[in-house]
Amino acid sequence: MTDFILLAPAATGIGIFKPLYWLFGVCMDFLMSLVGNQYFIAIVIFTIATRLILLPINIRQQKTAAKSARLQPKIQKIQKKYNVQGISDPRERQKAQQKVNEEMQALYAREGHNPMQMGCGPMIFQMVFLMGIVGIIYYPLSYVIGMNTLGDFSADIQSLVQSTLGSDKPVTYLQLTILENWDSLKGVLSANFADIFTPEKCSAIEAYRGGLYLLGLDMTAVPHWKDGIIVIVPILSGLTSLASSFVSTRIQKKNNPAMAQQMKQMNFMMLMMPLFSLYIAFKVPAAVGFYWIVSNLIIIIQQLFIAKIFPPKKSQAKLMLENTIYRRSREENIKKIKN
């Protein structure tokens, strides 16, 4: 998902996501008006709200995982029965695998279990949400402040910004560059693009700009080791990502002990993703890293909450009781039909 962030165009974003940017911009503008233009408080509220929306899906995934764990001994028995890996002849191995698949499907049908219910819905939702966050972080002038025509003149504005700042390097994130250097650019932008940078919009930019400071740190800036305390943002981003991966792995091991051996192979990924997050957080504005920190912390709390409310043993015991009741009911119905 971070690839989308790095490759996002400098003007007004990726065309297909612009309606999403607009929607998130409207929501962000509304939240900021409620919390006195406190940008980061609005981000926290926004993230918590979306996680609450996602909570029922995560609970359903937890229940499905518990059911999968309960069926593991039966699944292993089927696999041991046909010993597909121990068959050297390709044709015989294919036949054995077909038998395994048939018995697995029959098992799922008897148990009323669909392993595909685990799904990737929450992941897709998180990706969509992150793209909306990209819109309000990278293109706030267009989607939060409502400067809709800025994109039509982005090339000319970018050229003027570069010449004013005296930089030979191309401006990667135009709107963030304007925010970061607003004091230097306000006069020249207002003079050359008066229809876009009107007095009303300039006042809105200044108010928005004020909300982008957190504990005195300019969160539109890209963190660098030479910039002092702001490096705490990417560091915390990496650490909270590692903590989230660790909590998730521990919960999965408890939910399904049979997968513990496979989980060992995932330890490498558990370390790589936080390191990748740390690296990317040094390539994007600190506001993005702040969002990742908040998101990771909320994910950890949500995972612990679900594990507490729906512990594996309790979930599996409840599933066994429900399955027993279901079977007895079906047996009674079959007896009535025969009589």
Image (cartoon, helix red, strand yellow):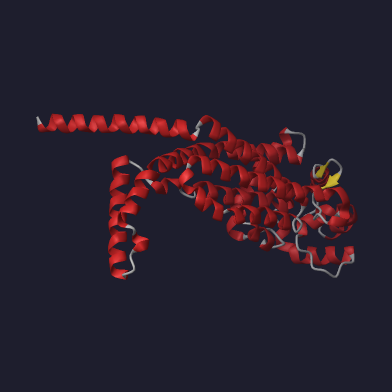
Spot occupied by residue 85 in the image (x, y as percentages of width and height): 37, 62
**Residue 154 against residue 113 in the figure, above or below:** below
Q: Residue at x 32, y 41 (%)?
A: 112
Residue 306 shown left or right of residue 42 in the figure: left
Residue 125 shown left or right of residue 8 in the figure: left
Q: Residue at x 41, y 49 (%)?
A: 116
Spot occupied by residue 262 in the image (x, y as percentages of width and height): 50, 53
Q: Residue at x 38, y 33 (%)?
A: 319
Viewer-nearest residue: 66 or 54:
66
* Numbered-mark total: 0
Residue 224 shown left or right of residue 110 in the figure: right
**Residue 139 against residue 171 in the figure, above or below:** above
Viewer-nearest residue: 190 or 32:
32
- Residue 233 seen from this side: yes
Q: Quadrant of the N terminus?
A: bottom right
Residue 329 found in image quarter: top left
Spot occupied by residue 313 in the image (x, y as percentages of width and height): 46, 33
Q: Residue at x 34, y 68 (%)?
A: 88
Viewer-nearest residue: 156 or 55:
55
Q: Quadrant of the C terminus?
A: top left
- Residue 145 seen from this side: no
Residue 157 found in image quarter: bottom right
Viewer-nearest residue: 315 or 12:
315
Spot occupied by residue 37 in the image (x, y as percentages of width and height): 77, 38
Residue 74 found in image quarter: top left
